[in-house]
Image: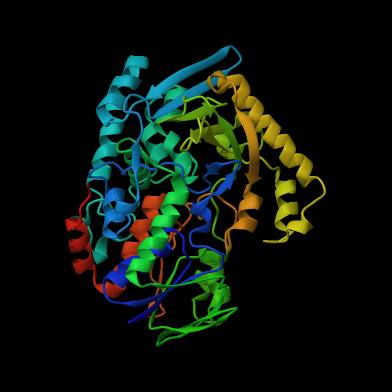
Amino acid sequence: MQTVVIGSGASGVCSALILARYGHKVTLLEAGREVAPLLRGFSRGGLHFDTGFHHAGALGPGGILRRYLNFCGLGRELSFKPYRQDCSELFRFVSDTGYEDVPLPQGTGKTTKTLASRWPEHAGFIRRFLSDIESAYRHSPFIDPRRMSAQSLMMPSGGKLAARFESADLPARLRSLLSARSIYYGTPPGRCLFEEFALVTHSMQEGVCGIENGGAALSRAFELALSRAGVDVRTGHKVTGLNASKSGVAEVLTDKGTFACEGCVYTGHPSRLPELLPQGSLRPAMARHLRTLEETSRFFMLFGSTSRDFLDGRSVLLCMSDDIENLFSSTDARHAWLHVSAGTPVDGRYPVFAVARTSVLSPEEAQGLESSGPGKKGGRPAWYPGWKDEMQNRLAGLIARHIPELNDFRVVDSCSEYSMRDWVEGSSGSIYGVMHSADNMPVPPFTRIPGLVLAGQSILLPGLLGAFISAAVACGHFTGYERLFRDLACANAE
């Protein structure tokens, strides 16, 4: 079967590799110059800086993400670096009188003990909450391939995360700690679905690993696996349309040629789909929904370097507010939470990535940039360069004042969501794409056009794991779910 995969991010590459494994003739189309442009990162001054990958959960031996990598033939090309067992995440809450550190270890039991020792009056709630998180993770069909079926492919509602806190009078810091991993997919805790939050949270609680040389190594592994699988990779091909009808998808049109196909996996941003398809292909309600999808939180990314090993094997979350909800609602950088981590050192210096999880632009400023249009770098307002420099200096100042362990930190570069929007073809600039929440209806992986399916972290689940799971769900439409999930369950996860 001739199948075209649109987009070479994690979900696109995974889709291409799965389909090739089951005998499909696969063409992978990418608008950028190289495969996996967001995951690839960039190099500056001899250091590699990651933009789309820093570390991930469920990458340890037996982890579901490790299983997907091995199933796709990627694992043997990668060297995994486990994060610290005693403190994989250090939360540093800043106040006028100083700061308080809360080091979170890996493992539900150890995390429970750590938090219960600090808030003994809430020990019972902490124990129940983390136990429910682990149970939801362990029993999810998305995590155990033996439980997967065509009937279990949509995320169950199961209520909001916020409902778990309604009857508990928790201190703001404890509530923020328990819901903190919502920042890893850009959804305010008050809007998170519990099951989805549980998948992200527990995966980051056990088996957290980095990859030696980060996204550069991951993108190289992608390229080698695609070559071995015989996938026809076409970079520099921007998709301009899909020739589809009620009988199915027939062709994918690009600015450099046309590709006939019997099936298509679309992994681009869902909002672009209505403009690519012939008018009337989608129901009006679905077309409107795709055009008005809500995006995840804004961000500002700072790149720098240090010779200190403080970030080796752990990340630091610098919390400028006790209440995590503030960082999703405020445009004041003083409420930001900085997620700071480091990559593989070179000649004694570590590349440092600091992501400010906050809306740093006012609505008026954001509207001014939006009107410039994707890719129109010259159309940005005159105030933008000065604003970017100010943000860069402000965030660097926060690191200098509140993470003295990095006392030789040097700034290398920075980027805003608009830099990301212009850099990654089809991206809206948000760090995690479409928001997954109880009141933002998810995009289903299937369309009413035969042979056209959707994948990517905007579809089922966020993050690298979500991208791989969505690819498996999309490909199961062509390979047969029972066979694919059986083979995945038997894949080596070591």
Q: Position of residue 349 (x, y in %)?
A: 53, 31
Q: Position of residue 214 (x, y in %)?
A: 44, 45
Q: Position of residue 387 (x, y in %)?
A: 75, 40
**Residue 339 visible somewhere in the drawing:** yes
> Quadrant location of the N terminus?
bottom left
372 w.r.t. 328: above or below? below
Taking the view exactly as shown, the residue that stands out farthest to the top is: 97
For image coordinates 55% across by 32% down, the residue present is 337
493 w.r.t. 329: above or below? below
For image coordinates 29% across by 52% down, the residue present is 76
Taking the view exactly as shown, the residue that stands out farthest to the right is: 382
State which quadrant residue 125 falls in: top left
Taking the view exactly as shown, the residue that stands out farthest to the front is: 347
100 lies left or right of 143: right
User: Is 318 in front, or is 115?
Assistant: 318
For image coordinates 38% across by 78% down, the residue present is 3
Q: What is the number of callouts on the image? A: 0
236 lies left or right of 388: left
For image coordinates 47% across by 38% down, the residue present is 343
Q: Position of residue 383 (x, y in %)?
A: 80, 45
294 w.r.t. 271: above or below? above
